[in-house]
Amino acid sequence: METILRTKAGDYRWHENWIVIPEEGKENGRTHGATVTRDGRVIVFHQASPGVLIYSPDGELLDRWGDYPGAHGLTLVEEDGEEFLWLADEQTKRVEKTTLAGEVVQSISQPPHSTYAERAYVPTWVAVNELRHGGNGDIWVADGYGASLVHRYDAAGQYLGTLDGTEGAGRFSCPHGIAFDFRKNPAQLYVADRGNKRVQVYNADGCFLRTFGADFMTSPDGFAPLGDRLIVPELFGRVTILDANDRLIDSIGRNETICSAEGWPNTTPLEPGKFSSPHGACSDAAGNLYVVEWRIGGRVTKLEKLA
């Protein structure tokens, strides 16, 4: 029996297990990132070897490559008409820019920040102020699982500085995911300050602008565009959709109570129409949503937009 979600953000047909994770990814295989290319291919980043999985719009596995045991953040960028991926591996600490075929073309090193004399560096996500959107090409790297910092580099990878949240609404607590919001002109840097249940927003130079979400978010993981809306996967069992002014439209697939169940998220039962542990999300040109979850063996769900 099909599952239809009727939400304030629209109606969606739920496709459970939209794609099959290759067998070698089942031992760990947590699906942490997702994006859609210009031609509609869906890319999933999961903790396995190979870690990058590329699917057709119909869910056929087209390609797989890369050894990323700590696969975490996945960001798609475009330069001079060519698409690239920025990948953050929390285990190996690698932050790499690759072609869609897997060739590494740039790497970002751990920054020379004094905190790393005592604390670990654990990169979780990358955001780029893309030239095609009028930006300067700066690269920002979130250390969400280590020192809770966000680092800035120029386009060549030279370290420029660091944000820790105190210049804004308060010290970051797990700045898990970051992204430039190109709905705004000029673009703004969004930081998913997950441990503080809010989003902090900066301009492209790292000057604090505002914060939002503390009154309706529980666990923001990151961001993905949906036309003039914004998708915010939240780890605690839901995906939140915001309007053009970052106001709540709806939180879909809500299932927050499962997060307190024994064994969550790895052994708790999955139910069509309800999320367990959303970690990443994206949308395609037709408005369909793809949600990946933090769960051993992975979970990739397609929410087909209904007219």
Image (cartoon, rainbow, N blue to C red):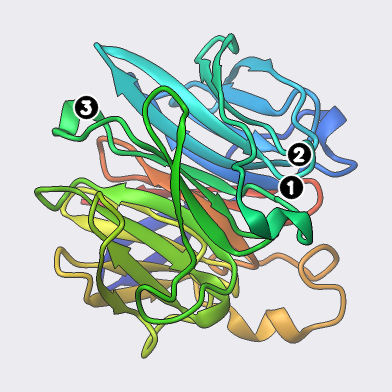
> In front: 1, or 146?
146
Label 2 or label 3, whichever comes before in sequence order: 2
Mark 1 touching mark 3, by CB under 8 A?
no
Which residue is outermost to the right?
A: 27
> In front: 60, or 246?
246
* Residue 2 visible at all: no
Residue at x 41% of width, y 54% of height = 13
SS of the residue at dot 3? Answer: helix
Within-10-Å neighbours for mark 1: few <14, some 14–19, many 20+: many
11 in relation to 297, above or below = below
Q: Nearer the viewer, mark 2 or mark 3?
A: 3
In percent of width and height, residue 27 lies at: 90, 42
Q: Amino acid at mark 2?
A: Gln
Label 1 or label 3, whichever comes before in sequence order: 1
In percent of width and height, residue 18 lies at: 58, 41
Q: Amino acid at mark 1?
A: Arg
